[in-house]
Amino acid sequence: MKKRNEWVRKALKRKKKEKDRGIVDFMMIIYHFFEQLPQWINEMTDPRHVSYIQYQQADLTMLGILKNICSIESMRQMEEKLNEEICIDTLRILSGNRELSEMPHYDTLNNYLERLSPECLSGLRKKMVVSLIRSKQFYKHRLLGKYWKVILDGTSLFYFKERHCENCLSTTHKSADGKIQKRYYHNVLEAKLVLSDEIVISIGTEFIENECEDVCKQDCEINAAKRLLSRLKKEYPKLRLCVQGDALYAAESIMGICQKNGWEYILTQKESRQKVLADNYERLGEEKAFVENMGKEGGVGAYANGVGGYAGKRETMNVYEYRYTKREEGGRTQHPFPMDHEYPSNKAEFRGDDPYRSRPLENRKRRFQQPEKYPIPD
């Protein structure tokens, strides 16, 4: 039998679906936040030959976006489902091209996307992010009133039984019958900017891939994070960030980059990642400051400043911990976070700066960034 909370979730989904107006809401968001989006798209470097240009770049880019938001799995399905007058009218409004009379063929869209430089799309994303930040509509959701929260996390894109390209990562594992099997895969690291409790957008992307087939050491998520953070500093030099991530990023190299760039950081702590830090934090015992009845779970918050110095670390490591009891399971759950921010002695001020509030956002972000698995048409 299904649990009652599952019934509630289904009821909420039905209510949200009744209010969902589909493409109308999408178009309203575009015109409210990104009124100049068609112009920005047309300003990108066009990879096509001048003599072959029939459609504007905004026509083709908006068509690709329209295909994805309508959950159309293949280009052929797009050709069949969107080849209607109402769809052409919608694309005409989105792209701003009043002279558009026919829907572009999917081969035209494929050829354009194959030639389009990824740097052009990255520049387009930067214009959109800067536009949202300068609108000042999300300033109240910044951490401590001045830091924009950025969440780092990697995700898998594809797995193959045979090598897909020279940039593939590889791994070996033993099957149930004892055979050693080799798998090839592609991963990507995403940096998500938290604009509010319900809005998380992409601010940076870094592919985790090998430079060539015969490499001595494979690329990894930490190295990709170093490249991504360096690029974020270059693209947004004046933006004050608070980098957040799981225990994988609780490395001194990542903390050092954040301190060098003048950023804050809040990372998850595990004994397997920073064992000396965890031991020194536990030894503090009653020296830690405790605040009860925090968060929606009514848990206990504890913090200790300067723990990294006790552990012999060069980077600043102040530890915040949140403990609560799960009602359903009855188990005790704790979440320690090493961070750069030093908490004040005033417990009332500490109560208002709960970094645990970002954890549901990170979980939601993981679901949203999982790529769609589109079947390849024959």
Image (tube, grey):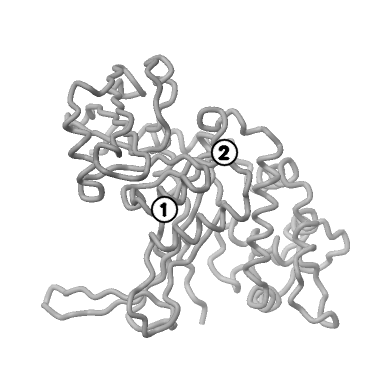
Please say whether residue 48 is visible from this viewpoint: yes
Q: Check disc 2 and report the residue beneath it.
A: 195
Front-most of residues 279 and 51: 279
At label 1, the amino acid type is Asp
Identify the residue at horizontal 30%, vertical 18% (top origin): 291
Q: Residues within 10 Å of mark 1 (few under 14, many from 20)?
A: many
Picture residue at 49% right of the left edge, 68% below the top: 374
- Residue at horizontal 58%, vertical 60%? 68
Coordinates of residue 134 in the picture (x, y in percent): 70, 39
Residue lying at the far right of the rendered structure? 99
The number of discs equals 2
State the image coordinates of residue 364 (x, y, percent, origin top left).
43, 44
Give yes or no for contact between labels 2 and 1 (Cβ–Cβ under 8 Å).
no
Q: Is residue 119 above or below residue 370?
A: below
User: What is the spatial separation of the Cα atoms under label 2 and label 1, in whole angstroms?
Assistant: 17 Å
Image check: 187 left or right of 26?
left
Residue 199 x/y as whole percent: 55, 40
Seen as rendered, the residue at the extreme left is 178
Q: Is residue 25 left or right of residue 180?
A: right
What amino acid is found at the position of numbered circle 2 in the picture? Leu
> Residue 129: horizontal and vertical position, in percent?
65, 48
Towards the viewer: 171 or 91: 171
Res 17 visible:
no
Helix, strand or loop at mark 1: strand
Above or below: residue 236 compared with residue 277:
below
* Label 2: which secondary element: loop
Please tell me whether residue 266 is drawn above or below residue 183 in the rendered image. above
Image quadrant in which the N terminus is located: top left
Number of residues whose C-alpha sits closer than 10 Å to that of mark 2, classed few (under 14), some (14–19) or many (20 or more): many
- Which residue is identified by label 1? 153
Question: Which residue is at a point 75% across and 65% down the rendered structure image?
Answer: 44
Which comes before the other along the chain, label 2 or label 1?
A: 1
